[in-house]
Image: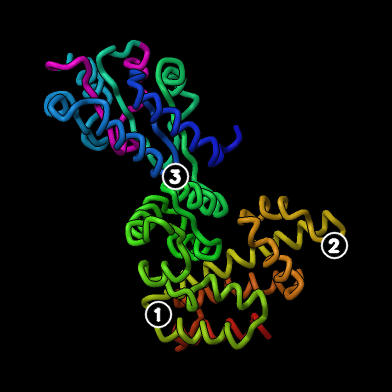
Amino acid sequence: MAKAGLKDIIANTGRILSDVKNKIYKPVYLLMGEEPYFIDMVSDYMASHILSEEERSFNQLVLYGKDVNAAQLIETARRFPMMSAQQVIIVREAQQMKNIDMLEIYAKAPMPSTILVICHKGKPVDKRKGFYKTVVKTGEVLETTQLYDNEVAAWVTAHLKEKHGTIDAAAGAILVEYLGNDLSKIANELDKLLTLLPENNKRVTCAHIEKNIGISREYNVFELNKAITQRNIQKAFRIVQHFAKNPNDNPVVVTLGALFTHFLKILKFHLLKRKYQGANPPPGETAAVLGVNPYFVRDYEEAARNYSLAKTVEIISLLREYDMRSKGRNNGAADHGELLRELAAKILY
């Protein structure tokens, strides 16, 4: 089965939230998968909006998978609500629950007055088992998957648009580069940032990120990748020197990881060019294969001109070597700053 894309995840999340808002409930919700942000969004909304504040005291229960087994949960779910038409049971970290597949028994004949919400993070439940198949028929399933880098950038744009904001492409790239694909962390930083911007101009720039989130717009791995792509030796070594002087703010493992990802995409671009007999592929196809925003396709076209396929393969090998050395293998007395300077020289010369 094909991986659910960002559009599908957002659409399904929106549909479930819309139904809850309109008081259209299913007896069992299975919220599962690799990306916890959407799971938390749906379960938190349910926790705040299905029951009134007065009803929650007696009829809303939050359990944790490590503390409850399937038999106990079934018994709890079959109880009647008190002075309310419904009770809501939310099971967080359900991936830690023992014998979760036994919930098939309950899913086949759920209590009409109970809304059971199962939050199963990290991976989906076994789709071959009866529990999953039964919830598909009698309840609601939301499956989330880990987003690709270009999907995270697209999500940032969509998240800000929903809040009547926008973001510069470079600012979005820096944000994703430093915060990774942790949507909860990114959303938290963006939401705080939006409160600081004027109502009539909610456009996030690199300057805003540098000032309020603490990511330097000049000295960051995104700018290092860009300088190396352009073979701007002076700028690249200025950034490397800054990293060497500020190792706590710029861990070498993060820098090496970003460089490795960057050159792996350059390698993919070279291989994609073979399909077009050495010509640059269509930008849309390049963006899809590399998993980048189309805004950055030209950067990879330039990188391929500056680094041949053979040189790219050599650099990827170097990055693996220096990653091992940064972890103490065959390193001698060189510190992380010296390793980074040495590596930059081998890449650029």
Q: Which of marks 2 and 1 is nearer the N terminus?
A: 1
Tell me the distance, in whole angstroms, between the alpha carbons under discs 1 and 3. Answer: 37 Å
Count every numbered label the image shows and give the total: 3
Which residue was labeled with disc 3? 162
Residue 246 location in percent, x, y? 39, 82
Which secondary structure, mark 1?
loop
The answer, for residue 339, to whether it is visible in the render is no
Q: Which of 158 and 232 is in front in this view?
A: 158
Please report the bounds of the magenta region as a residue range.
Answer: 82-108
Which residue was labeled with disc 1? 247
Which residue was labeled with disc 2? 278
Q: Which of 152 and 33 is in front in this view?
A: 152
Tag 3 near tag 2, CB within 8 Å: no
Q: Earlier in the sequence, mark 3 or mark 2?
A: 3
Which secondary structure, mark 3?
helix
Which secondary structure, mark 2?
loop
Residue 199 location in percent, x, y? 37, 56
| Amino acid on which the number 1 mark rests in the picture | Pro
